Image: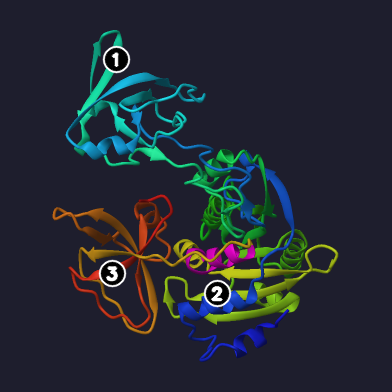
Amino acid sequence: MKTLEQIAAELQGYDPQALSADMVNEFLAGLVQPVHATEDVGLFDALGRVLAEDVISPVNVPPHDNSAMDGFAFRGDELAAGGPLRLRVAGTALAGAAWQGRVGAGECVKIMTGAVMPEGLDTVVPQEFTKQDDAGGDSFASFDAGIVKPGDNRRLRGEDVMQGQAALGKGQRIGPAALGLLASLGISRVRAVRRVRVAYFSTGDEILSVGDAPREGAVYDSNRYTVFGLLTRLGCEVVDLGVVHDDPVLLEATFLQAAERADAIITSGGVSVGEADFTKAMMKKLGDVAFWRIAMRPGRPMAVGRIVSHDPANYGAAVLFGLPGNPVAVMVTFLAFVRPALLRMMGANPEPKVLLRARSAGAIRKKPGRTEYQRGIVSKAADGRLEVAITGNQGSGVLSSMVQANGLIVLHHAQGNVAAGDEVDVMMFEGAV
């Protein structure tokens, strides 16, 4: 296990007092390692979990050639003659059972969506493109040969997933579509990485818990609830350790308890310049911790490292994320840095950094030399293009702005002022679009 000093030595230009946002993620990639424990989980418990191994398909999906339409199945070579076709209907193929008859030249089979294609037939004309009539006790389907081509509207055996193919890969997070795919293979359980356990608590004498009586100079703790929501949505197992006041004995006991119970620890507050030294001093005492001033806004102060448990039989050393105290700064630093690090700890494949491009509705002041995350609302303008407007007051304590926003406008390190009409990058919130 590398020390923080060794990780820092591998980063060119590392300066803990002026760290770029990109370098923070590089550092964390060296600090955080995936958990190795795995477990079998049923499909209803697998949503959001990370696969610990490839899932090999035991079957073909679909298991046979079948019709993609309600219509009439026939041999595609009947189209060679061109012009209108009139085919005798030899029977009806329903989904769930193979049709057992035989089809000769000039004949077709009425077929339902999903029904097995009768032997020798390879093309389906949709029912709405045909005219049907009866003559001499037989039924006929007529249509223009130009509306379909040989092979149209037929699903091939195994065209979704072939038997023996890796249907899902190790490190993939299981979403709703993946759940459906697993079910389509007849698989009821998968091998997943154990959930990452994250302990979190807020620090400070000025913090009130929900239910406490108000008092002058104190504020209610919102960070525990936003962190809980962010961790739960990510799929972590959460350990809420409440609010810890500025007492060295309480802080030490809480840090040690967190390290014994969890893979990672998240704190909010107590890492800014000028704040009480209790939290920072305890971090230093109990582990290997670096204190950063990140070139970003909001969220400049942050601590990272490891807290060492007194009971190595349990977790031993938990990764520490010491976040700022301001509510918006907590959420921004979590989304920008902690979330990618926890995904790595979960064993998930790296997520591509996809940023939406949108036109700025107004001018935005920005100094080069730091990354700024402005709360924004993306919408469609009258001309059909995407446009983003800031939510107003961008103070790091204005939590209501995060409720109003559907994404963060990312103004990059070297970027300067933005004029109205300029395109900017937006980190969209999950589920917003």
Residue type of the residue flagged with mark 1: Ser
Q: Would you say residue 336 sits in the magenta stretch?
A: yes
Q: Which of marks 2 and 3 is nearer the N terminus?
A: 2
Name above or below for residue 408 compared with residue 181: below
- What residue is disc 2 on? 302
Image quarter where the N terminus lies is bottom right
| Residue to which mark 1 is pinned | 139
Mark found first going from the N terminus, 2 or 1: 1
Q: What stretch is highlighted in magenta?
A: 334-345
From mark 1 to mark 3, how far is it between C-alphas?
62 Å
Q: Earlier in the sequence, mark 1 or mark 3?
A: 1
| Amino acid type indicated by mark 3 | Val
- Give the alpha-carbon distance from disc 2 to disc 1, as whole Å: 77 Å
Give me the residue at 22% from left, 37% from top.
81
Q: Where is residue 225 in the image (x, y as percent from the top left)?
A: 55, 52
Tell me the element at label 3: strand
Quadrant position of residue 139: top left
